Image (spheres, rainbow, N blue to C red):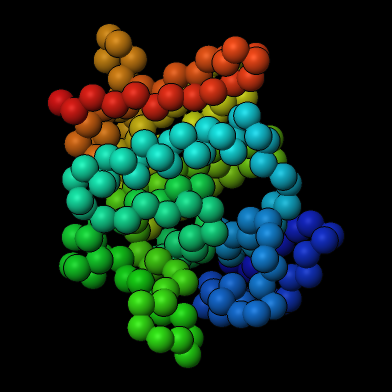
Amino acid sequence: MSPGVIFDERVRVPFIASLAEFRQWASSAEFPESGRIDYLDGQIEVDMSPEDIFFHATLKTCVAAAIFSRVEELASGHVCTDRTRVSCVEADLSVEPDIVYISDRAIDTGRVRLIPKAGEEPDRFIEIEGGPDLVVEIVSDSSVAKDTLRLPAAYLAAGVKELWLIDARGKAPAFQILSIVRGKYAENKPDERGYRRSPVLRCVFRLERKRNRRGRYVYKLGERVK
């Protein structure tokens, strides 16, 4: 597929002919320091839109904190947010998800690989190569089709074990946990109390939103170990 660009005029994108060239650009000093710039199935997608505070930013913080807390309990790996680049040659993919969890087992077995920063001392890494254990994407106005259609297909091809999709723009937050079943993503349906199973984190979660005393939205990601 010939590369294309969905661009923002504030970002100068060089001619990129392949995933390898995009990854090289993404690790260079010329790569923009702000915005989200992804390579997805031969197409470069640039999104410079600011995060919506109460429908994206605070929600992401809540979810990342809950996942981090659970991973700490399990002592099982690492949680990253924002500008953590995930690339997969098999999926023709290089993206910066909202939240990423990679297990120690995935690293130790080589299912994912940590890419070192060029010319730096040990323990400096700038990219995850392969399929993480869990990825979270929070839908925004500028990324609906990407988050709900194109990215799930790419994450499936990359072997991401579990995908969380959250859309808080409606009257109530839409929260999905998707796991790979017979080669496809299938939604883990909620139980009678609204909890959804996360096989990767070995517990169930329920996302709640309410208004605080000042009328602003706050979120809680409740969990129960089953």
Position of 210 relative to 93 (above/below): above
Q: How many marks?
A: 0
Residue 223 at x, y percent in the picture: 29, 26
Position of 128 relative to 163 (above/below): below
Comparing 214 with 110, the one in front is: 214
**Quarter location, residue 66:** top left
Residue at 47% x, 90% y is 119
Q: Can residue 184 be spotted in the picture?
A: no
Position of 19 relative to 164 (above/below): below
Comparing 51 with 160, the one in front is: 51
Q: Give the residue furthest to the bottom.
A: 119
Residue at 22% x, 31% y is 203
Residue at 50% x, 39% y is 61
Residue 48 at x, y percent in the picture: 73, 52
Residue at 70% x, 52% y is 47
- 114 left or right, relative to 137: left
Comparing 82 with 143, the one in front is: 82
- 141 left or right, relative to 212: right
Q: Give the residue furthest to the top.
A: 192
Q: Can residue 98 be spotted in the picture?
A: yes
Residue 38 at x, y percent in the picture: 59, 59
Question: Where, quadrant-wise, is the C terminus in this rendering?
Answer: top left
**Quarter location, residue 34:** bottom right
Position of 218 relative to 139 (above/below): above
Q: Give the residue furthest to the left.
A: 226
Residue 192 at x, y percent in the picture: 27, 9
Question: Where, quadrant-wise, is the N terminus in this rendering?
Answer: bottom right
